[in-house]
Image (tube, grey):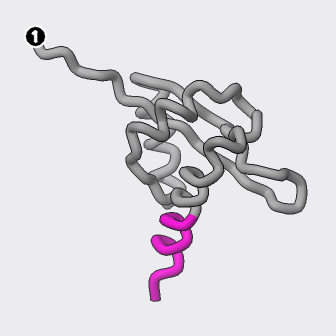
Amino acid sequence: MPNRKKKKAAALRYNEERENAPKVVAKGEGEVAKNIIKIAELNNLPIKKDEDLIELLSKVELDKEVPEALYKAVAEVFSFIYRTTNKS
């Protein structure tokens, strides 16, 4: 049987009026990850696959802002979201 890694997912939220940085509002692996992705799809939210970033985000506590060390990577995700949702 092949050694398959469990699917992982994390969801970020950013409210610039109340938060200094994006927060991890959901994270998990296996069935939890599948549910996070399903909810995103049902709500037409963009999904970006980045295995390295998910490994780092999975270490951030729920409802905590991402650490400064991850700002650049998270900014790239938000840039992806902006490009994806603002296509003319």
Mark 1: which secondary structure? loop
Residue in view at x 46 percent, y 71 percent: 84
Residue in view at x 53 percent, y 32 percent: 56
The percent position of residue 82, horizontal first and vertical second, equals: 55, 71
Q: Is residue 28 left or right of residue 68?
A: left
The percent position of residue 43, horizontal first and vertical second, equals: 53, 56
Which quarter of the figure is the N terminus placed in? top left
Residue, far front: 69
Secondary structure mostly taken by the magenta-highlighted segment of the chain: helix
Q: Is residue 16 left or right of residue 22?
A: right
The percent position of residue 55, horizontal first and vertical second, equals: 47, 30
Residue, far right: 18
Q: Is residue 49 left or right of residue 24?
A: left
- Residue 74 is a magenta residue: no
Residue in view at x 68 percent, y 38 percent: 25
Specify the segment rendered in magenta: 79-88
Q: Residues within 10 Å of mark 1 (few under 14, many from 20)?
A: few
Decide which of 76, 32 is in the foreground and name it.
Answer: 76
Pointer 1: what residue? 1
What amino acid is at disc 1? Answer: Met
The percent position of residue 12, horizontal first and vertical second, equals: 63, 46
- Residue 86 is a magenta residue: yes
Residue, far bottom: 88
